[in-house]
Image: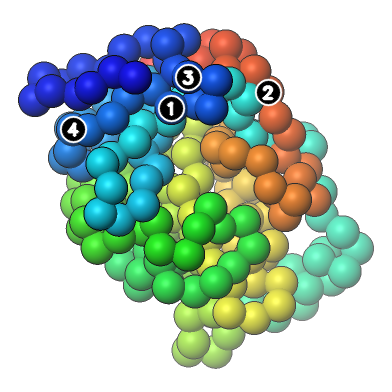
Amino acid sequence: MYKISSELYFPPVSQASFQGILAEGGDLSSERLLLAYKSGIFPWFNPGEPILWWAPKSRMVLYFEDLVVSKSMRNILNRNVFKITFNQNFKEVISNCSSVKREGQHGDTWISQDMIDAYCKLHEMGIAKSVEVWKGNELVGGLYGIDLGTVFCGESMFSKVSNASKVVFITLAKHLEKENYKLLDCQVYNDHLDSLGCKEIDRELFMEILNSGS
């Protein structure tokens, strides 16, 4: 495994281990995080442990034409049961992603305070973005991720009420498709994402798509 020094550098993603771990160490500076995402890499580690940088061989993504919207979800969306906003409460969204147990979460505590602080800085730079789901004046769901211009790298989402996570995901996907994004990166497989139309593609194809937009 590559040990990161103070140098702003990542090895090629092809050097990742069978499990998908590419490198260890470094920091969560805005510059390093942005380089990571542009290079097809993301951080995922437990608080108190060294930072691990991942580039899995199979990448879970959504091609927008594959988005699954059930009849019941279309009904919910058409009735405007929820209100959707963009980039209105980023810190609250990422904080809820850290604390609220939800479908599709890698773990219960992996979004540490250091992670929250780092992504809030990226949000201030206009790179990290959020989508919020409201029921009345209450924030009941949301997601956040990194916007690379033609690919949106989804990081995490939360839901406090039934269907909120589906609503936020579908709304973001439709918005990205309208803005001519190439795909929505969802990182790793889970059943919830699969039910929404996401699928795994090879790392090489993901990198080809990612680099074609840079």
Q: Residue 124: x, y in percent?
A: 21, 53
| 1 w.r.t. 185: above or below | above
| Residues tagged 1 and 3 counted as in contact (Cβ below 8 A) | yes
The amino acid type, in three-letter code, at marker 1 is Ile
Q: Local crowd at mark 4 within 10 Å, few (<14), some, or many (≥20)?
A: some
Mark positioned earlier in the residue sequence (4 or 3) = 3
| 160 w.r.t. 172: above or below | below
Q: Check residue 21 in the rendering and tell me which mark sits there, or answer none.
A: 1
| Residues tagged 2 and 4 counted as in contact (Cβ below 8 A) | no
Mark 1 → mark 3, Cα distance in angstroms:
5 Å
The residue indicated by pointer 3 is 17
Mark 4 → mark 3, Cα distance in angstroms:
18 Å
Q: Secondary structure at mark 3?
A: loop
The amino acid type, in three-letter code, at marker 2 is Ile
- Tell me what residue is drawn at x 80 percent, y 51 percent: 195
Q: Quadrant of residue 76?
A: bottom right
Number of on-image labels: 4
Q: Local crowd at mark 1 within 10 Å, few (<14), some, or many (≥20)?
A: many
Mark 2 → mark 1, Cα distance in angstroms:
17 Å
Q: Secondary structure at mark 4?
A: loop
The residue indicated by pointer 4 is 26
Mark positioned earlier in the residue sequence (2 or 4) = 4
Q: Residue 119: x, y in percent?
A: 28, 51
Mark positioned earlier in the residue sequence (2 or 1) = 1
Mark 2 or 3: the one toward you: 3
Q: Local crowd at mark 3 within 10 Å, few (<14), some, or many (≥20)?
A: some
Q: Secondary structure at mark 2?
A: strand
Q: Is residue 196 visible?
A: no
